[in-house]
């Protein structure tokens, strides 16, 4: 699992690459939490475009970061959901808890 952080004023974007499972979940959560506490963004964007596999650990990562962002009156936004990540989040009804940015169809 690799991650890139992009700090855009009051938005912290986290680009995720590789597989998200219980083996990397703690380290990933800790890294994101550190950046949130350091920058205090009003919006945390989690970009799943580079994620090739995700189990329910990804859901725990998102919900934990949502809880932390609520301490800063901030929001969490998910982008580029596809494959396993989209399936896990859809089954959990994640859009009730965070913003899900849907990508327009290329045919439109």
Image: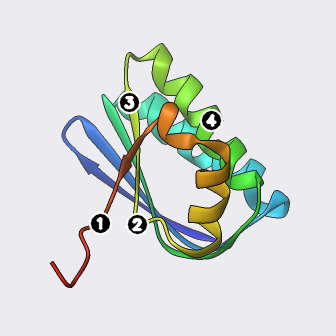
Q: Residue beneath label 2, please?
A: 80
If you read the primary sequence from the N terminus, does the residue marked by circle 4 or circle 2 appear first?
4
Disc 3 on helix, strand or loop?
strand
Q: Residue beneath label 1, please?
A: 103
Q: Pinpoint residue 69: horizontal percent, then vertical percent.
A: 47, 26
Number of numbered discs visible in the structure rendering: 4
The span from disc 4 to disc 2 (Cα, nearest Å) is 17 Å
The span from disc 4 to disc 1 (Cα, nearest Å) is 22 Å
- Graded by Cα atoms within 10 Å as few (under 14), some (14 to 19) or many (20 or more), the crowding at tag 4 reads some
Position of 78 with respect to 22 (left or right) is left
In the image, is residue 90 above or below residue 23? above
Position of 95 with respect to 6 (left or right) is right
The span from disc 1 to disc 3 (Cα, nearest Å) is 19 Å
If you read the primary sequence from the N terminus, does the residue marked by circle 1 or circle 2 appear first?
2
Residue 42 picture quarter: top left
If you read the primary sequence from the N terminus, does the residue marked by circle 1 or circle 3 appear first?
3
If you read the primary sequence from the N terminus, does the residue marked by circle 4 or circle 3 appear first?
4
Q: Residue beneath label 3, please?
A: 75
Residue 15 picture quarter: bottom left
Residue toward you, 88 or 71: 88
Q: Pinpoint residue 17: horizontal percent, then vertical percent.
A: 54, 74
If you read the primary sequence from the N terminus, does the residue marked by circle 2 or circle 3 appear first?
3
Colouring of the image? rainbow
Residue 63 image label: 4
The span from disc 2 to disc 3 (Cα, nearest Å) is 17 Å
At a point 76% along the width and 53% down the height, the residue shown is 57
Residue 43 picture quarter: top left
Q: Do the residues labelled 1 and 2 touch (CB within 8 Å)?
A: yes
Disc 4 on helix, strand or loop?
helix
Point out the frontmost of discs 4 and 1: 1
């Amino acid at each position: 699992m690799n991650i890139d952080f992009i700090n855009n004023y009051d938005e912290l974007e986290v680009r995720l690459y590789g597989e998200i499972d219980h083996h990397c979940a703690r380290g990933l959560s800790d890294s994101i939490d550190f950046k949130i506490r350091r920058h205090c963004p009003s919006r945390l964007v989690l970009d799943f475009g580079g994620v090739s596999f995700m189990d329910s650990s990804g859901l725990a990562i998102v919900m934990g970061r949502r809880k932390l962002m609520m301490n800063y009156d901030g929001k969490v936004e998910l982008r580029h959901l596809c494959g396993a990540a989209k399936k896990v989040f859809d089954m959990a009804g994640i859009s009730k808890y965070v913003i899900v940015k849907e990508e327009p169809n290329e045919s439109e």
